[in-house]
Image (spheres, rainbow, N blue to C red):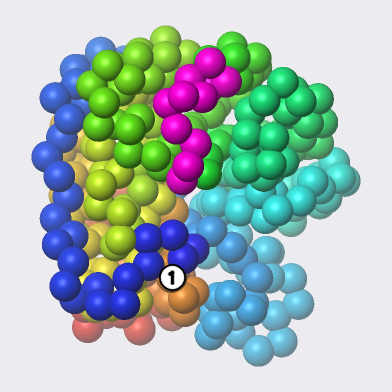
Amino acid sequence: MKFGKVDRPECIDFTIPINHPDTEVILSEQNTDVSLTVHVGCAKWNRKDLKNFYPRGTKNELEFYGRHFNSIELNATFYRMFEREQYAKWRDTTPDNFKFFPKLVRNISHLRRLNEHTYPIIDEYLIATANLKDKLGTFFLQMHDNFAPKNWDRVVRFVEYWPKEFPLAIELRHTDWFNDAKVAQELYHLFEENNIANILVDTAGRRDIMHMRLTNNEAFIRFVGANHIKDYARLDDWVDRLVDWKSMGLKNINFFVHQNMELDSPLLSAYFITKLNKKLGTKLHIPKTLMDESSALY
């Protein structure tokens, strides 16, 4: 993911902004009897991107990945429509507790831009993706940077059309969605009323979209490492913020690690899991070889 890439990340202030005041309100309204669910993973599983992660001779990369992480941000589905048989194969390749978080195909978000021609594509996409069955996590829609509030009606129609049985998260990147108080309030209300997660993106060159506003009981976070030692301190800060949100009532954490240049995403993920286990008392599996490599940073 090159979104928000900068040449000198050491010059960026990566401080996580304070909570939006309504985030605590949303979390305080959640069911306290529900146990905490945490998914952490990368955005891809192929050998070309995750260099040095797979042992020599690994034949099934997804099977190996699934033994080390409990989830994947399924970015592959953004670029093309897959047949339902492919989803069934992915489902059968992974462990029982594994979850896929599919990104909506770009025909919907970037080419049709949620216009009236997207709805048959949505139907086709969901029919195929539903073959993940019990391993299907939250879908997410990521719109182009220039998709602005002038397209408000398209967002409303899309939300109204979306089948409520499928969990959904939405990522909007145009700053007017958050900087215009009236627009922001209407957007957050729409998400709250329809149980849609408001995606948080932490990337170096776009600190202007760190709105810190949750709209339901799901923190869906897309963390973009800057290929710099600062990435580890940034992950520490996220662990502290998630601990804070859990104390307010947060029950679902979905945290996915990207890098501008995919080199160490599994290592960063393993580091994050280790810290999260210590601070939250979770018992997520940590790949031992990855833990050994990053032990000096703990």
Give the x, y percent position of residue 162. 63, 19
Q: Quadrant of residue 99?
A: top right
Which quadrant, please, contains the C terminus? bottom left
Asked whether residue 154 is drawn in magenta, I would say yes
Report the side of 2 relative to 229 (left or right): right
> Which residue is drawn at the image coordinates 58% and 75% (left, top)?
49
Q: Main secondary structure of the magenta part?
A: helix
- Using the image, determine if residue 217 lies above or below residue 1: above
Judged from this view, the residue extending furthest toward the front is 150
> Which residue is drawn at the image coordinates 14% and 55% (left, top)?
15
Query: 71 and 92: which one is in front?
Result: 71
Q: Can you identify the residue that label 1 sits on? A: 260
Report the side of 29 relative to 136 (left or right): left
Query: 254 and 82: which one is in front?
Result: 82
Q: Is residue 148 visible?
A: yes
Magenta segment: 145-155
Give the x, y percent position of residue 136. 63, 37
> Which residue is drawn at the image coordinates 44% and 60% (left, top)?
3
Asked whether residue 204 is drawn in magenta, I would say no
- Using the image, determine if residue 47 lies above or below residue 154: below
Give the x, y percent position of residue 244. 15, 38
> Which residue is drawn at the image coordinates 25% and 47% (left, top)?
208
Report the side of 86 relative to 144 (left or right): right
Q: Quadrant of residue 297?
A: bottom left
- Amino acid type at image mark 1: Asn
Q: Quadrant of residue 264?
A: bottom left
Mark 1 Cα shell of 10 Å, populated few (<14), some (14-19), many (≥20): some
